[in-house]
Amino acid sequence: MSVRIDDTDRKILAELQRDASQSLDEIAARVGSSKTPVWNRIRKLKGAGVIGQQTVLLDAEALGFEATFFVLIRTSEHEADWQRKFLKALRDRPEVQEAHRLAGDIDYILKVRVKNARAYDAFYQTLISEVRVHNVTALLSMEEIKSTTMLPLNGVGAP
């Protein structure tokens, strides 16, 4: 479903990205509208699929997840059965925060969040026991410089 997004919609979306726990009154005040029109716009945006799942961002380090690995995977297998098993293995592993199929020399990249290197090794051993991969390279992130879920909304939905 296609939806036209105007400046007020963009302001509402920006507020929701900033803090989705705000009340409708707070959002309405920040975007210069009243509660009912804001609620109607949010419903429209949800119905159009612009607003998806609402969740809470947790502090991984505060919970003991101190290591982030970016895992580069090359495979010589591209059959449907292998892909099905691989995708299931990724979906079954809560350590995998993101997984992307790539163009180029690397077939897949994973973002894996674990407590430490030993936990990463357990993840790795489980993964390679479930699916065959040609080559795996794990890169440990030394410092997270920027991480956001917020999209740049300037110009989105403009005619």
Image (cartoon, rainbow, N blue to C red):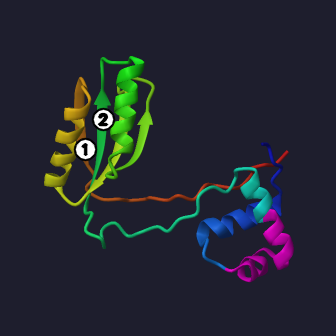
Q: Residue type at mark 2: give it.
A: Leu
Do the CB atoms of the residues marked 1 and 2 lie less than 8 Å apart?
yes
Q: Residue at (25%, 68%) from the top-left corner?
A: 64
Residue 138 drawn above or below residue 143 = above
Separation of disc 1 and disc 2 at Cα? 8 Å
Q: Is residue 83 left or right of residue 11?
A: left
Numbered range of the magenta stretch: 23-41
| Residue 76 on image: x %, y % | 30, 17
Which residue is at a point 78% across and 49% down the rendered structure image? Answer: 157
Q: Amino acid at mark 1?
A: Leu
Is 1 in front, or is 59? 1
Q: Pointer 1: what residue?
A: 139
> Which residue lies under the disc numbered 2?
72
Q: Is residue 124 left or right of residue 79?
A: left
Task: Please give the name of the residue rendered at 19% of the width and 33% of the height, measured from the top-left corner.
Answer: 129
Residue 28: within the magenta? yes
Q: Earlier in the sequence, mark 1 or mark 2?
A: 2
Q: Quadrant of the C terminus?
A: top right
Magenta highlight on residue 8: no
Task: Look at the numbered disc 1 and give the secondary structure of its residue.
Answer: strand
* Residue 39 drawn above or below residue 120: below
Q: How many marks?
A: 2
87 versus 61 height, above or below = above
Residue 10 pos. (x, y %): 75, 60
